[in-house]
Amino acid sequence: MKPQAEEKPVIKAGVEEKDYSGAKYGMWFFLLTEILFFGGMFLLYSVYRYRFPGEFHAGASEENLVWGSINTVLLLTSSLFMAAAITAVKKGNNKLSVILQALTVVLGVVFLFIKGSEWGEKIVKGLYPSSPALLKLGKGEILYFGLYYVMTGLHGLHVFVGIVVILFMMYYTVTGKINKDYPVRLENTGLYWHFVDMVWIYLFPLFYLVT
Amino acid sequence: MEERNISERVSFYHESGGRRGILGWLLSTDHKRIGIQYLAALLTFFSVGVMMGLLIRLNLLSPGKFMGAQTYNEIFTIHGIIMIFLFIIPGLPVAFGNFFLPILIGARDVAFPRLNRLTWWIYLTGASIVALSIFLHGTPPDTGWTFYAPYSIRVKANIALAVLGVFVLGFSSILTGLNFVTTIHRLRAPGMTWLKMPLFAWTLYATGWVQMLATPVLAITLVFIILGRIFGVGFFDPTKGGDPALGIAIVGYFVWGHHMFTSGMSDTSRVIFSFITFLVAIPTGVKIFNWVTTLYKGSIVVDSPMLFALSFLFLFSIGGLTGLIQGALAPNLQLHGTYWIVGHFHYVMFGGGGFAIFAGLHYWFPKMFGKLYNERLAKLGWFILFIGFNTLYFPMFILGYEGMPRRYFDYPARFHTGNEISTIGSWILALGLIIIFGNLIRALLKGDKAPADPWGGRTLEWKVPSPPPKENFEEIPVIGVAE
Amino acid sequence: MERTEGEQRARIVSYRTYIMTWLFLLFLLALNISVSQVLVKGITVLLNIIIASCMAVTNLVFFMNLRYEGKFLRLMVSMAILVLTLIILFTFSDVLFRAR
């Protein structure tokens, strides 16, 4: 191993020194666990889809490609704003950063709203787990809708958590706790937000493009 | 550091960060305080688990005399849940890892002290949820600790709650792993290179990665079981097209694939998993040979920690070798789901994990509490525990080989002798535990004061006072070439 | 090569880079949708996943700046993906060959 001693944080008794790389490592490690967490779901999806290809196609015909695509564009754009917000802070422009973060939040909220109305539309049709209408359908379709609700639901939960975290970051950016000398909290939030975006990048073809 | 300097520093027990009583512990970010709290919790759960175990054996001495079948199912389930999820899995990392990792690598604390405190709270929450599932009205879980679907999806018991508890515990496990791995990467003292790092720190590093990579997959399966119970999402329910075997499979595929040879999985898969099971035996064998040859020509001082370590080697080897027998496909068909498995499992988990925890406890006790325990009593306790352990679990191999299924409430008369011996063993084992813990508690109350280094140890923890001061080192030590 | 922490902390990625990344992602998205609408069924699934993977990698490399992270982190990200792949392979070793 190469000597890295000079990069290591020197911690003096009673003084809390900030460890930039340590914080980054922590976030990346967390994202690795998230990859495997979502990985379990994708695994289940692929197995059941392999078993019931026809019924998965039939189930997916319920999805509205237009809304799904709009939602994907929304998330990709929010990722752009998030990334730009970090650049803004690093350039010392906290004001711009707050605006960009706010835009990210707005797009996230709109995403959740659209997702919610898609759910609502299906629920009105009686297609939700264990509903009488659903249980009348084939086994493959029961599984399809189960996966649909669980996967988009857990993803939505992650988006929601992301929004809450960004709101905190906006507060820190306003108060200056996040600044160009120590932007790591915002950078880590960005990593999380991009990751959630990445999960959607896979969810989109699996649920909207299989018809 | 000079000896004089050392004794002047206040131990972490006396620095509560200005908070009173229990809050000085619960709100503390000091890795040592957190470690001690984990240890207390672990040993409490262990005691409860032991009592459940004794009850199981008591029933099997004379089935139906002491409890009904449903009670029996609940008791062995709770025994499993407590011992696996609350004691063995968190065991070494959270208690000894928290206390010693930073000291061993020459750091003042872990990388994320506040996250560490949060992790401790999450552990407490998870444990409380599990406890709730037992005491809340309705039936306590009775599925066995493995929560195998589809039974766990359908049975009317507080499964969702118990599984939620395990999920929360898993979360705390992930965060512990993340924290330790980051700590080892970022906070090693100058000169503490990877290859100079003590073996225990390496162990924690590897465990940290396993916790990060395996627990999430377990967690998502638990989420599926919870959703299955609450919302009727039937991923593992055959009536809804789900595949229960898949549920078992995803739960840590590396580990549990070889539990399923008789579940109707494909032959290809069986051969692959049998092969992997044998592959696992290779590093395990290398480890055991390595430990044994380390002893060769060493000047061995047979203190109580050493006795625990040596018996760990012996018991773990038996556990490992019996594992090979059931890992082979043909014998597995005979041994699957019998008491053989129970014997194997306890030799690995208790004989391996449990004895290792006791060895660590006796080795580090003087450092953690600053008190010396009675060595003769410790040895006596070890001896009785060791005898009791083998009397309790060895007959299980024979019972299993003869075909007695595990988890059953009752058995035909021909299995009676084996069960009798086993139950008597459980009482001997309990006596051993009482002596061991009595001795340690006595030491806590009126043991002699421990010096900084009672063993002649070479690692960093023996260079700081017993018990260590709040941030371990006044100056971060520089590790040079061999002292 | 390991980059020093100071370098990493000070590195500012330009708005321009991010906008280009975004445009590229939108392009891939459009490609993905049109592939699913136009082409024959059998191959589209595979193509969809490949294009989605391209988007994910773009995201990792440019938005998440994995390219500026050290060797170690890149290795670990690949390890997580490898573990996931293995789990999927093992599962399919059962699913594909099971007697029905």
Image (cartoon, helix red, strand yellow):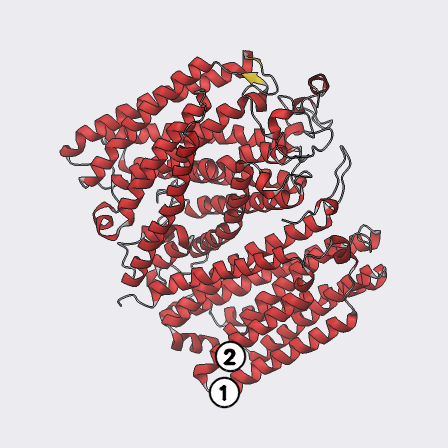
Element under disc 2 = helix
| Residue B203 location (% of width, % of height) | 51, 40
Count of marks overlaid on the render? 2
Report the mark closest to the observer, 1 or 2.
2
- What residue occupies the far left of the structure in this picture? B414
| Residue B260 location (% of width, % of height) | 31, 53
| Residue A175 location (% of width, % of height) | 83, 51
Label 1 to label 2: alpha-carbon separation: 10 Å
Q: Which mark is residue B93?
A: none
Q: Between residues B201 and A155, which one lies in front from this camera angle?
A: B201
The quarter of the picture where residue B405 lies is top left
Q: Which mark is residue C39?
A: 1
Element under disc 1 = loop
Which residue position holds label 2? C47
Other residues around mark 2 within 10 Å, as few (<14) / some (14–19) / many (≥20): some
- Position of the N terminus of chain B, as image quadrant, is top right
Residue A171 appears left or right of A41: right
The numbered mark 2 sits on a residue in which chain? Answer: C
